[in-house]
Each structure stands twice: as C-alpha cells, then as structure tokens.
Image (cartoon, rainbow, N blue to C red):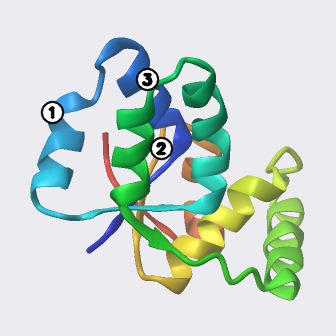
Amino acid sequence: MPVLVDTSIWIEYLRSGDYAEKLEYLMDENLIVINDLILAELVPSLKVRNQRKLIELLRSIRNLVLAIDWEQIIEFQYRCLRNGLNGIGIPDLILAQNAKQYHCEIYSLDNHFELIKDILKIKLLVQ
C-alpha cells in the first residue's frame, strides 16, 4: 500500500536524520508518495538553502494529483466538529482526502491524524 509521507516526517528526517530507517525502507520498496501540498510546504525552505539535489529527489517521488472535493472537505470538517475536534486544519483534511482517494496510508508526526483516523476512516502508518 502506498504511503503518503507528511511534511512533519520530512522535516524531522532532514533536520536530524530521525525516521531514516523507515523512510529508506519505504523508498527501497517504492512505497512513498507525495503531493503538491507537501511539496509546497517543503520546497521553498530548501530553495532558500540551495538544496537542489534534495528538491530533485522530492520531485522524483510519485506525486498524487490533488483532486480536492470541497464538499467532502466540508463533510470531513463537520464530522470532526461533531466529534469535538475543532482544531483540525484544512491542509490536514486535504491530505486525508488525498490519501483516501489513492488508498494510501499516512505517515505523520501530526497527532491530528491519530485523532481523525477513525472519524474519517483513514489508515496511518505506525511509527
């Protein structure tokens, strides 16, 4: 099953090398996927630091098209609010929707995904 690696994992990996073993395994197995939302969060700071090779590597990962269904995003937010979760951001809901569309697991350090996984029926890769 493909794994959508969230920005939080990439940041920790790039900053400290944490999660290297799992990321390298996922890369070796060709399971990692990314999308333009994640790239938009990562690439600008990499450009500032002139890390072209890393940008090329990230851009070489299979990129899932973001076909945002805004009515579904509204429904996701409604379900979250109905369950007492009022701090879930739209970018997290977009990532959840994208992962569901492509039948992916999400790999993230963001605890919002743990909170919404049962409500939105998303799959998470365990740390």
Q: Indicate which disc residue 12 carries.
A: 3
Decide which of 80, 3 is in the foreground and name it.
3
* Secondary structure beneath label 3: helix
Classify mark 2: helix, strand or loop: loop
**Screen quadrant of the C terminus:** top left
Asked whether, in this view, residue 81 is left or right of residue 67, the answer is: right
Q: Report, in whole angstroms, how far the alpha carbon at label 2 lies from the one at label 1.
A: 15 Å
Most extreme residue toward the top is 16
Instruction: List the residue tagged with mark 1.
Output: 21
Quadrant of the frame with the N terminus? bottom left
Q: Is residue 1 above or below residue 58?
A: below
Q: Please tell me which residue is depicted at 51% across the width and 72% down the height of the picture.
A: 99
- In the rendered image of this protein, does residue 68 appear above or below residue 109? below
Mark 2 or mark 1: whose residue is earlier in sequence: 1
Of the residues shown, which amino acid type is indicated by label 2? Ser
**Please, what is the three-letter code of the amino acid marked with disc 1?**
Glu
Left or right, 41 with reference to 13: right
The amino acid on which the numbered mark 3 sits, given as a three-letter code, is: Glu
The answer for how far apart the CA atoms under marks 1 and 3 are is: 13 Å
Percent coordinates x, y for residue 8 in the rendering: 53, 35
Where is mark 2, residue-wise? 108
Q: Residue 92: x percent and y percent? A: 70, 55
